[in-house]
Amino acid sequence: MTDQSSPFTGFPVSPVYDGMTSTAVRDLLDVLSVPGVISFAGGAPAAESFEIDDVRECFDWVFANRGAKALQYSSTPGEPELREQAAHRVSRTLPTTADQIQITTGSQEAIYLVGHAMLRPGDVVLVERPTYLAAVQAFASSGARLIGIPSDDDGAQPEALEELIREHDPRFVYLIPTFQNPSGVSMPAQRRREIAEVLLRTGAPLVEDDPYGELRFEGETAPQIAALPGMARQTLLLNSMSKIMSPGIRVGWIRGEGPIMNTLSIAKEAMGLHSSVVDQLAVARYLEHYDVDAHVAEVAALYRGRRDAMAAALPSILPEGATLTRPEGGMFLWATLGNGIDTTALLPMAVQEGVAFVPGASFFAHDPDRTTMRLSYVTNPPEVIDEGVERLGRALRRWRG
């Protein structure tokens, strides 16, 4: 029974969250739960690609051989076995030691952790235009002001980046150079070198998010910006096991150099002490004893067929003048419909027709292009993609009246 005379009026809420009842990510998950809807909305890997037996064997081994350790508290930087394996994997493109690795509970925690450890209210962060919507949410929660870098078919424009750095003195620059979320764009090697030259010339720190880099199915591999001469000490490189093993096993890491790594560890200690020891040990076992590269190659081949199916089906239903990216890897296509089509208003019509996508507006730090949409091709087989595109075409015809 509630005492009506009590002076308690409810729990106070931080100004960051005051009045917030939902988020773009939560709204997206709600759409995914609608029965009968073909979803091009989620960023979830194809479930049939999961190596369930291999992963089960890893967990079985952990409990059979390291059970007591797996169930005990651990150190904040991460389990030594996993840090060694992460360093080994990163070293294929960028020489790395275990003490340069901070384990995180997925790359989303890594993004939040970087913002929490580095940002003050009012600080500027430069991001691509468009950029990852959950990064916008994470950095904004630390009070940052996000400013979009004009981008083209090759990614962020170096001249615009340098101008914005000199004008705003950002706390850091956040980029997804390889198979960017949401656009699917991958910076060619020359553009990466030009971006690195700007960052080295201005001294601006880089946070390079690379969750999709291994999912290349065509084209030439370009080095991470962090791996370019002089950039390792100036870059925090974020990686994740979500796209190459499983997103349900929340394991990622940050690769960096210098005092910032201790700062990140102290910040993570305050947030959650450490990531799941069970998951860390299982992932370390998987990386050391299983053919991860062969698995990634199989996943990339699967995704290529689904990219081809969606890229072939979409042009026939898009309005005249619309543009569509054709990524060489990763998980997403990005469509710009133009013609005054507000994709946020289009989405309910699409869901009524039985298909979902992500409206593009939430991927912009400011001044969004509301005629854009992100479409994931990885979750559904080609025949389902064809049916989903047909449903999307019906929604567009309804919009045009």
Image (cartoon, rainbow, N blue to C red):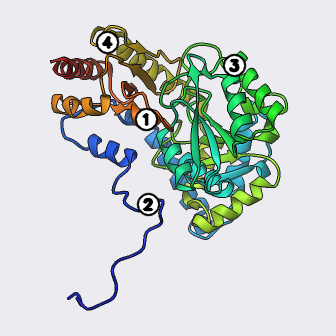
Instruction: Give the labeled residue for mark 2.
Output: 17
Residue 313, numbered label? 4
Between the residue at mark 1 and the residue at mark 2, the CA separation in whole angstroms equals 30 Å
Query: Which of the 4 quarters of the picture holds residue 345?
Result: top left
What separation in Å lies between label 4 and label 1 (alpha carbons)? Answer: 21 Å
Dots 2 and 3: beta carbons under 8 Å?
Answer: no
Q: Mark 1 belongs to which amino acid?
A: Pro
Residue kind at label 4, given as amino acid type: Ala
Residue 273, x across and y down, in percent:
61, 67
Mark in the foreground, 4 or 2: 2
The answer to whether any part of residue 252 appears in the image is yes
Q: Residues within 10 Å of mark 1 (few under 14, many from 20)?
A: many
**Left/right of residue 192 with respect to residue 339 in the rendered view:** right
Can you see residue 251? no
Of tags 4 and 1, which is closer to the observer? 4
Residue displayed at 38% across by 49% down: 23
Give the spatial CA distance, label 4 vs label 3. 30 Å
Kindly report which numbered mark, 1 or 3, lies closer to the viewer in this rendering.
Answer: 3
Q: Secondary structure at mark 1?
A: loop
Q: Along the polypeptide, which appears first: circle 4 or circle 2? A: 2
The residue carrying pointer 2 sits among few (fewer than 14), some (14 to 19) or many (20 or more) residues within 10 Å by Cα, namely few
Of labels 2 and 3, the one closer to you: 2
User: Which residue shows up at 68% across the image and 54% down it?
Assistant: 118
4 or 1: tag closer to the N-terminus: 1
Which residue bears the numbered disc 3? 191
Camera-nearest label, 4 or 3: 3
Q: Answer with mark 4 or mark 3, whichever residue precedes in sequence.
A: 3
Q: Amino acid at mark 2?
A: Tyr
Rendered location of residue 19, percent (x, y):
37, 60
Residue identified by numbered label 1: 45
